[in-house]
Amino acid sequence: MLNTEIESEQPSEPKEKTTSRLPETAKISFNLLAPYNEKVSLVGEFSNWEPIAMQRDETGTYQVQVSLPDGEYEYKFQAVSKSFFAVDQEVTFADPYARQVTDKDVSIMRIKDGKPIVDSYEWQHDDAALVQDDQLMIYELHVYGFNGGGYRKAVERLDYLVDLGMNCVQLMPVTEYPGANYWGYNPRYPFAPESSYGKPEDLKYFIDECHKRGLRVILDLVLNHSERESPLTRIDFTYWFYEPGTEPDEARDVWGPKFNLEFYDAKYQRNPAREYLYALVEYWVEEYHLDGYRIDAARQIKYFDFLAEATQRAKKLVPFKPFYVVAEHVPENPAVTGIDGPVDGAYHETYYWMIDDLLVQDKYDLDQLINAINPVHYGYSGPANAVNFYENHDKPRLLQRLQEAGVDDENAFRRLECAAALLITSVGIPMLYQGQEIAHAYAQDEEVHLVDWSLLEQERHQAFFERWRGLVTLRRERHALWTANCDFFHMDPEARVIAYVRFNDEGSRVVVVAHVGDNYLGGYTVPCFPEDGVWHEWTRNYDATVDGALLEVELGAWDVHIFCLN
């Protein structure tokens, strides 16, 4: 943490007219919370990397002031460690609150006009109109994987997302992690943006350009754990983390030093891990103008009171714009969302398994299908509480799964189109993973796979993209799909046909007739249709007349027809 006081260092007695003057400097305060460490020093290029002794105050924070002119400086801290692997050893580490770091784990601090700054970026599009939560259509992307470069390179393809019709970007973690171009769930410096993608101002430019295009930005944030060589592990490991082997999780769910949200320091009256993470949540909203968070590993975090406090702290910083917090809670738990839950939404894991069972395993379970399409049946309280998906960074690509199951390409793409239509018309917020809309396929692993945009040059993939674009337009324009209203009025287990209507109080209605099987059903009659009249089929652009509550329709294999009233 950095504070300043401007201090002029001019000569005490002015001399005759001169063309030079000593630069004005500021007293910059460097701070490090290390209440039980016996010795802490500051080292930096401004001291030729020689230690500058720091003094501990009554809060347990070591402090020192250094007079520095405007510029950019590298620095670190040294401390006599209390961590179990380095007791009484002197260790050197970057600032746990570093806003920027080098690829060599050195903190960077910038000073401008006598004050520490993150950067000089000036926001251009803070007043851009952004959609409300119930209208979200989320596109999960990895900065490097999306367009083969950093933050500014990713901006070059944002117009593609606008053309597709999406209105929200969910960034995989961009807090500084060791190495480059990785998933990012091993954060080492959580206050600093990943340096292999660019500088802080480059990330801000990306977010600003998203807002310019009406795209909200949700950041995937890791609050459960840190990385083994993060600064906090070297100062006093068990002050912030559980001692290894004592984590309240299965061994398979321990991905790094786990923050100990239970520990309370009675002497200094603080919960150190919670205070650190609350500051982190507030910082990214305030500094980077985010529109939401995706909370990684919410089940492992466990404490709903912590999640609720983190959510409220973030929202208090942006009271006049929508802010959405979604939790990855596996297995899913609807109680984490809604009026009484700590966050706004949760990953609807059941949806993934419904699509996998139905399209890949060829298992037809009507109850599973209904409960997935309308998550209210599963315990979610509203349309913005469930995020539906059948692909994300943790899941194998659907086309890959179908290919491994022996489904040929023609039939695989029929099933892909079926899955896309169900996702867009289901109750909840639809989420795509980058490349899903052009039918990407590769085996599941933790590598960063670049989106192969050349797929759009292939007829079948281009047609699939156009299908997606039409479905997204439907979702955007038909307000019935923003609600929790969903009535299943026809279910034919033998033919594997279901029909449901989505509606709102203003009279918008969308009817979905889905054949989730391999055979052809010519002249199929759908009874109990919601209203007689001429209905327009959205995806194939034809009109159908309903008379006596009966609709006759030709249903191919894995065929979904979507009807709207003219």
Image (spheres, rainbow, N blue to C red):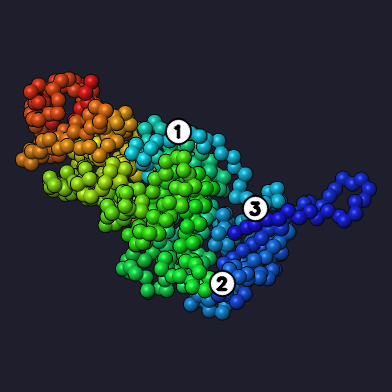
Task: Decide: few, some or many residues near mark 2? Use Cα within 10 Å; few <14, some 14-19, many ≥20.
Answer: some
Instruction: Please report whichever mark, 1 or 2, sits nearer to the chain's N-terminal start.
Output: 2
Front tag of 2 and 3: 2
Residue farthest to the left, as pictured: 494
Q: Quadrant of the N terminus?
A: bottom right
* Residue type marked 3: Pro
Task: Decide: few, some or many residues near mark 3? Use Cα within 10 Å; few <14, some 14-19, many ≥20.
Answer: many
Q: Is residue 181 left or right of residue 64?
A: left
Which residue is label 2 attached to?
A: 35
- Helix, strand, or loop for circle 3? strand
* Residue type marked 2: Pro
Task: Decide: few, some or many residues near mark 1? Use Cα within 10 Å; few <14, some 14-19, many ≥20.
Answer: some
- Helix, strand, or loop for circle 2? loop
Which residue is label 1 attached to?
A: 129
Which residue is label 3 attached to?
A: 116
Residue 434 coordinates in the image, percent (x, y): 37, 43
Residue at x 17% of width, y 45% of height: 369
